[in-house]
Image: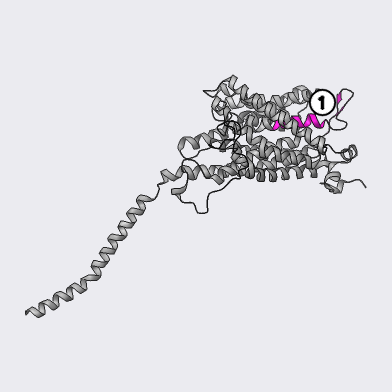
């Protein structure tokens, strides 16, 4: 074969092999890019805790949000029919106000990080909450916790719950707008400040105070604000006369019972979400343990109230049974993780007994609490806070008492000042005529049950 022919054949073979060589180079390059991308991408072990904790906050948050419906139904059932529309309006309005004020002021006041205005006592003032950017990538996220949006949403629900507690106590004689102005102050400033002392890393946290989900920080705090309001407002007309207490039955015990069941359900988010982590086997198992203990305490509170009212009055009192369940829930909230199921039963049962016994004590003092929020949230909150050292290590009765007293004094005194200012500036109580005829017509101009109206 001559040289010219050999060269031609070799050139043809080279041309034929060019696509194969190019393909091999492309494959090698693609594999290299894939390997680099895989090396750079975070593993599920890295992003899993962030994802699961964020999901816990979102699920827990909408369960606690459902408690707003529970409070609304409970209060609508325990007030008289002539005041139901006003009570429902207060409940949806306070939830909406809390949503705005907690964004505008509350969240960063409660969780200031390093931005304390007064270290350990007052967080960042007038700093609206800012969420993550749309489409946040893993490299820019704080993978050791959860998204800011989910944390804000979850914590907001606790703020709104505190205001709901005040609403029921002051029902049937308070003007709508003064109550809503107080709600602005409570949700924007009072609750975030006292909660920052513990959950924001403030001075109570440094001291060793322990309140897992808010027996003191939420429930007793709301109870103290309600107590201050009740003292300034005074009892309903006809409630106390000649040394006797006259009952004023609610309009709809079916609604009150429904409200209690809704609150019971929402409490699983309230306590379970307060684990604040769901990224490993231990955390998610603890959430399940919290659910079980929460349910046990509510059950024990209801049964204890049922038995006690039968012994005291010869008949079971449904309203006391409902409040007994709620008092059991409040009692376990300070420490729902550590007790055994039997321990949770004992804690809840004592809470139920408190709900029954404190009501007549308040009546003797002529403190008119329409729905029993002070016994359920304040007194049972004290019990739940003080019982923590029996089950939780590294806590002490002295520290628990100091924490409860500090938050109680702060909430009561500042709330009292706000109520007194509102009373002096615009008045907080409706007229005698309006109270007798019902707040629905005087405050709202509409009735919840118009078919039952006279005439």
Q: In the image, 183: left or right of 6?
A: right
Residue closest to the far left: 1
Q: Residues within 10 Å of mark 1 (few under 14, many from 20)?
A: many
Q: Between residue 106 and residue 386, name the one nearer to us.
A: 106
Task: Find residue 228 and report its image quarter.
Answer: top right
Q: Do we see residue 349 in this rendering?
A: no
Residue at 83%, 36% in the rendered image: 429
Q: How far from the left and from the top, in percent, is residue 91?
A: 73, 42
Q: Secondary structure at mark 1?
A: loop
Q: Position of residue 138 (x, y in %)?
A: 45, 49
What residue range appears in magenta? 222-248
| Residue 225 among those drawn in magenta | yes
* Residue, disc 1: 366
In the image: residue 357, left or right of residue 49: right
Vertical order, 367 against 72 (above or below): above
In this orientation, which residue lies closer to the viewer: 358 or 97?
97
Q: Nearer the viewer, residue 99 or 298?
A: 99
Residue drawn 78% across and 25% down? 362
The verdict on residue 284 being magenta is no
Where is residue 53? Give x, y as percent: 51, 42
Residue found at the far right of this picture: 455
206 horizontally vs 314: left or right: left
């Amino acid at each position: 074969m001559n040289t010219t022919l050999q060269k031609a054949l070799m050139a043809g073979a080279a041309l034929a092999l060019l696509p194969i060589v190019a393909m091999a180079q492309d494959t090698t390059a693609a594999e290299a890019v894939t390997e680099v991308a895989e090396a750079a991408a975070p593993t599920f072990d890295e992003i899993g805790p962030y994802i699961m904790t964020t999901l816990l906050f979102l699920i827990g948050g909408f369960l606690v949000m459902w408690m707003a419906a529970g409070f609304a139904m409970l209060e609508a059932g325990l007030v008289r029919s002539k005041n139901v529309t006003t009570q429902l309006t207060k409940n949806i309005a306070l939830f909406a106000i809390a949503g705005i004020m907690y964004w505008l002021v509350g969240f960063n006041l409660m969780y200031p990080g390093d931005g304390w205005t007064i270290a350990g006592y007052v967080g960042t003032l007038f700093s609206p909450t800012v969420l993550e950017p749309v489409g946040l990538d893993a490299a820019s996220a704080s993978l050791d916790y959860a998204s800011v949006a989910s944390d804000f949403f979850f914590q907001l629900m606790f703020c709104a719950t505190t205001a709901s507690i005040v609403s029921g106590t002051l029902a049937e004689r308070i003007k709508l707008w003064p109550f809503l102005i107080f709600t602005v102050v409570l949700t924007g400033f009072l609750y975030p400040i006292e909660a920052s002392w513990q959950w924001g890393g403030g001075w109570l946290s440094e001291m060793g105070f322990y309140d897992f989900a808010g027996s003191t920080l939420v429930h007793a705090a709301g109870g103290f604000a309600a107590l201050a309001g009740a003292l300034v407002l005074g009892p309903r007309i006809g409630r106390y006369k000649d040394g006797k207490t006259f009952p004023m039955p609610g309009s709809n015990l079916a609604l009150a019972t429904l409200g209690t069941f809704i609150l019971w359900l929402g409490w699983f988010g309230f306590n379970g979400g307060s684990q604040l982590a769901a990224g490993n086997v231990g955390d998610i198992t603890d959430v399940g343990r919290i659910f079980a203990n929460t349910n046990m305490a509510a059950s024990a509170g209801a049964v204890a109230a049922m038995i006690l009212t039968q012994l005291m009055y010869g008949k079971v009192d449904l309203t006391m049974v409902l409040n007994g369940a709620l008092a059991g829930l409040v009692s376990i909230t300070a420490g729902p993780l550590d007790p055994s199921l039997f321990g949770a039963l004992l804690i809840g049962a004592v809470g139920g007994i408190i709900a029954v016994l404190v009501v007549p004590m308040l009546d003797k003092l002529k403190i008119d609490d329409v729905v029993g929020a002070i016994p359920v949230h304040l007194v049972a909150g004290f019990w739940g806070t003080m019982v923590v050292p029996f089950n939780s290590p590294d806590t002490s009765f002295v520290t628990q008492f100091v924490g409860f007293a500090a938050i109680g004094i702060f909430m009561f005194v500042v709330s009292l000042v706000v109520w007194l200012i509102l009373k002096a500036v615009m008045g907080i109580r409706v007229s005698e005529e309006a109270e007798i005829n019902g707040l629905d017509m005087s405050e709202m101009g509409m009735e919840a049950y118009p078919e039952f109206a006279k005439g």
